[in-house]
Image: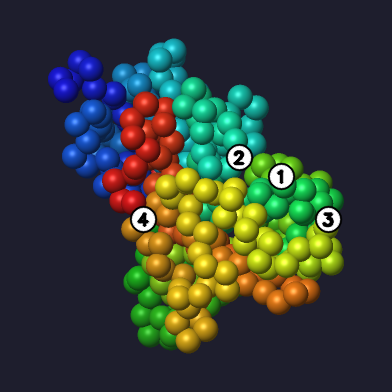
């Protein structure tokens, strides 16, 4: 393909955690031309503005305010946007970039001019909860609880440095898992509630651990609080048929058979892929559903590239599948 027919992509924030991972996934793509900014000028508004308006697709791997600013500089009507930041996930005029979420979503992404990449915790949560709500098993007014265990890369460059450069007593402290979001106001709550169509936000509590990446999002359910009687096997069957044919979502055997090690569920087995594994555990009166993903894969950069491919009419595979 010559450069005149290649899709021009500009990653604003190309040196950050998400930006670097997107670039890695796009390496070697012959249908794309990556517009590179001079590293010395990567925060220079004039240099960024020029590339933004040269691009067919702008990907904003930036803090929320910088992402809003970058998108505000678009003058070229051809420039489409993929925004991995938190700024537009429930905003009017934006498509939520989770193609597998429900029928029609993939088509909506294909035709979209503005796509918001879901948050990593929200990706796991919604993969579990949307099928239950849409199939009428989980009432919209349910009181939903969710936990998430995540690697530290989700906290961006600063947190990565904090973990990787710690020494002495501080290093010892960081070995232990650390619950956070303890005001119960995590920034993913608005998208969790709105996209799932729940009447109220879940009670959500994440934990960060001393490992680079990998994520387990879990939602416990009492069987008698569901809209109709359901066993773990019935919930497993529901997910299996809901996600049938989806290349990146894998419903694992009931009870995690064959996927647990001495009864333990690993958090890192989807790393370096765009995959999300769904697990169903339980006994007759209690059900636990768990999503496993790479927080930097299906939880961020993999999802961004999957959306980019759909928008460009390219094969959906993300380079690291
Ligand atoms: N959708 C998802 O699942 C995920 C999304 N994110 C989101 O993606 C965005 C980036 O996160 P992440 O990659 O982890 O963050 P990082 O901190 O690793 O990277 C952000 C990058 O943006 C640069 N930057 C900051 N301000 C400006 C500016 N005004 N102009 C140009 N560059 C700027 C930073 O440079 P410097 O370091 O020099 O300041 C850094 O290189 C955030 O909004 C985050 O919320 C993150 C993880 C998952
Ligand atoms: C460990 C850690 O701090 N993780 C981040 C994950 C952020 C994320 O997924 O993404 P967005 O920034 O795009 O929302 C957090 O929980 O806020």
Q: Is residue 292 left or right of residue 195?
A: left
Q: Which residue is mark 4?
A: 273
- What distance separates the C-alpha of mark 2 from that of mark 4? 22 Å
- What distance separates the C-alpha of mark 3 from that of mark 4? 35 Å
Q: Quadrant of residue 104?
A: top right
Residue 134: which disc? 1
- Provide residue 69's location: percent of width, then percent of height: 49, 29
Tell me the colour scheme of the image: rainbow
Residue at 49% in and 22% down: 111
Which tag, 4 or 1, sits closer to the chain's start? 1
Residue at 54% in and 28% down: 108
Q: Which residue is mark 2?
A: 102
Placement of 293 over or under 107, stated as above or below: below
Residue at mark 1: C-beta within 8 A of ligand 1: no
Q: Residues within 10 Å of mark 1 (few under 14, many from 20)?
A: some
Q: Is residue 30 left or right of residue 269?
A: left
> Of 119 and 46, which appears nearest the observer?
119
Q: Which residue is mark 3?
A: 227
The mark closer to the camera, 2 or 4, is: 2
- Provide residue 279's location: percent of width, then percent of height: 56, 65
């Amino acid at each position: 393909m010559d450069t005149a027919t290649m899709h021009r992509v500009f990653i604003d924030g190309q040196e950050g955690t998400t930006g670097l991972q997107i670039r890695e996934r796009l390496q070697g793509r012959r249908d794309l031309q990556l517009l590179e900014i001079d590293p010395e000028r990567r925060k220079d508004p004039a240099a960024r503005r020029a590339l933004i308006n040269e691009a067919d697709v702008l990907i904003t791997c930036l803090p929320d305010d910088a992402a809003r600013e970058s998108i505000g500089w678009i003058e070229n009507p051809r420039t489409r946007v993929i925004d991995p930041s938190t700024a537009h996930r429930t905003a009017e005029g934006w498509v939520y970039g989770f193609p597998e979420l429900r029928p029609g979503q993939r088509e909506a992404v294909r035709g979209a001019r503005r796509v918001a990449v879901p948050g990593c915790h929200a990706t796991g949560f919604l993969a579990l909860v949307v099928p239950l709500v849409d199939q009428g098993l989980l009432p919209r007014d349910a009181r939903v609880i969710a936990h998430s265990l995540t690697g530290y890369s989700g906290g961006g460059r600063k947190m990565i440095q904090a973990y990787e450069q710690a020494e002495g007593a501080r290093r010892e402290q960081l070995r232990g898992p650390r619950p956070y979001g303890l005001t119960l106001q995590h920034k993913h709550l608005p998208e969790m509630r709105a996209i799932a169509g729940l009447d109220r936000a879940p009670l959500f509590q994440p934990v960060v651990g001393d490992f680079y990446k990998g994520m387990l999002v879990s939602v416990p359910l009492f069987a008698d609080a569901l809209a109709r009687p359901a066993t773990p096997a019935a919930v497993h069957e529901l997910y299996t048929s809901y996600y049938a044919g989806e290349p990146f979502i894998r419903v694992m055997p009931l009870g995690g058979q064959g996927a647990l090690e001495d009864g333990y569920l690993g958090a890192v087995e989807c790393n370096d892929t765009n995959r999300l594994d769904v697990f169903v555990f339980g006994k007759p009166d209690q059900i636990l559903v768990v999503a496993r993903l790479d927080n930097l894969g299906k939880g961020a950069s993999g999802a961004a590239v999957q959306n980019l491919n759909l928008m460009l009419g390219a094969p959906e595979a993300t380079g690291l599948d």
